[in-house]
Image (cartoon, rainbow, N blue to C red):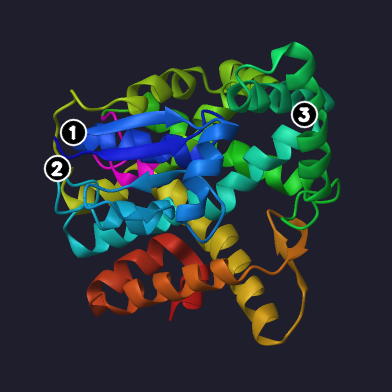
Amino acid sequence: MSRYEVYGALGSPYSLKVRAALRAKRLPHTWTGMTAEDRARVMPNVKAQVIPVIRTPDASWTNDSTPFLLGLEGEGRALVPAEAKLQFVCLLIEDMADEWFMKAMFHYRWAYPEDAEWCANWIMFDSLPNAGREGVERNAAMIRSRQISRMALVGCTPATAPVIEASWKRTNKALESMATGPTRFLFGDRISLADIALYGQLKVMSVDPTPMAWLRAETPYLYRWLDLADDASGLDGDWLEPGAAIAAAPVKALLAQAGDTYLPFLKANADALAAGAGTFEVKLEGARYAQGVFKYQAKCLDTLRSGWNALNADDRATLRGLIGEGAAILD
């Protein structure tokens, strides 16, 4: 039987995103929590050394979750609504989850000593299943030091911590209203790629000590929703009508956040790259945010602009009213 082979890690949000998507699409697949031994065998098959790594039924390899999953829209159940403006909204939220929401995952994981120790030990326990406690914790100390050293590069510093945490909590409060609302997911009773991308980030945070405590105390039904999104293979349902979907309070809140936070972040990065700068600063959530430039995030903005410009004028006008002033960044 042909199947997709997913090599990932339980501490990796993108690994869980891909696994949840394949489950929701009801596509045959296997899951391998990648050990150090697996890594030596699997990683040479891809250029970028990031997980998850997926071997497709035609024996090719890939590891960029979004292009991979979009390429599967013709297989199994669709995860992206077909209607044009709703499709754009889904992909915008998915992109925001992958590129902005993930900063909270990285921040909480390595900024707090308890979390850093817990997460590093957990990651190495999965990677080195036969190393014993001493071996796991010795290697965990090294990965912990390496990841902490990378925090400033991705914008996770003491100065930006208030921005990242405020933005994360803002998103979660919008998602709590979804979890307790009239539909199970953002766009109806059918799970979407946007839901799954948000799930991937939150699922790993739901076991990291600091964000876990906040989620359980402040957004308890979102915390429970994560298990619903983890395996939606048995959940049947439909999308809402596009007008109803984008008028729903959680979606409106996320679009407003894309307009005042995520799109300005992408623009500041792209402008800095165009100017040949190595870092950029931008005001987000009412405070200063700074980080190093990333070429991949400039590609994300280009992709969103292409999708935006493919919409008709009426659809752009409708979404402009929801996104706010930040929609001009997409023009």
Q: Which residue is mark 3?
A: 139
Q: Is residue 85 above or below residue 32?
A: below
What is the distance, in whole Å, between disc 3 and disc 2 at their CAs?
40 Å
Q: Secondary structure at mark 3?
A: helix
Q: Residues within 10 Å of mark 3 (few under 14, many from 20)?
A: some
Q: Secondary structure at mark 1?
A: loop
| Residue 26, label in figure | 1
Q: Which residue is mark 2?
A: 76
Residue 249 pos. (x, y %): 38, 42
- Highlighted range, magenta: 183-196
Of the residues tagged 3 and 2, which is closer to the observer? 3
Nearest to N terminus: mark 3 or mark 2: 2
Q: Quadrant of residue 84?
A: bottom left
What is the distance, in whole Å, between disc 3 and disc 1 at their CAs?
37 Å
Residue 191 magenta-highlighted: yes
Q: Cβ–Cβ below 8 Å for labels 3 and 1?
A: no
Residue 178 pos. (x, y %): 38, 32
Q: Cβ–Cβ below 8 Å for labels 1 and 2?
A: yes
Identify the residue at the far top of this view: 133
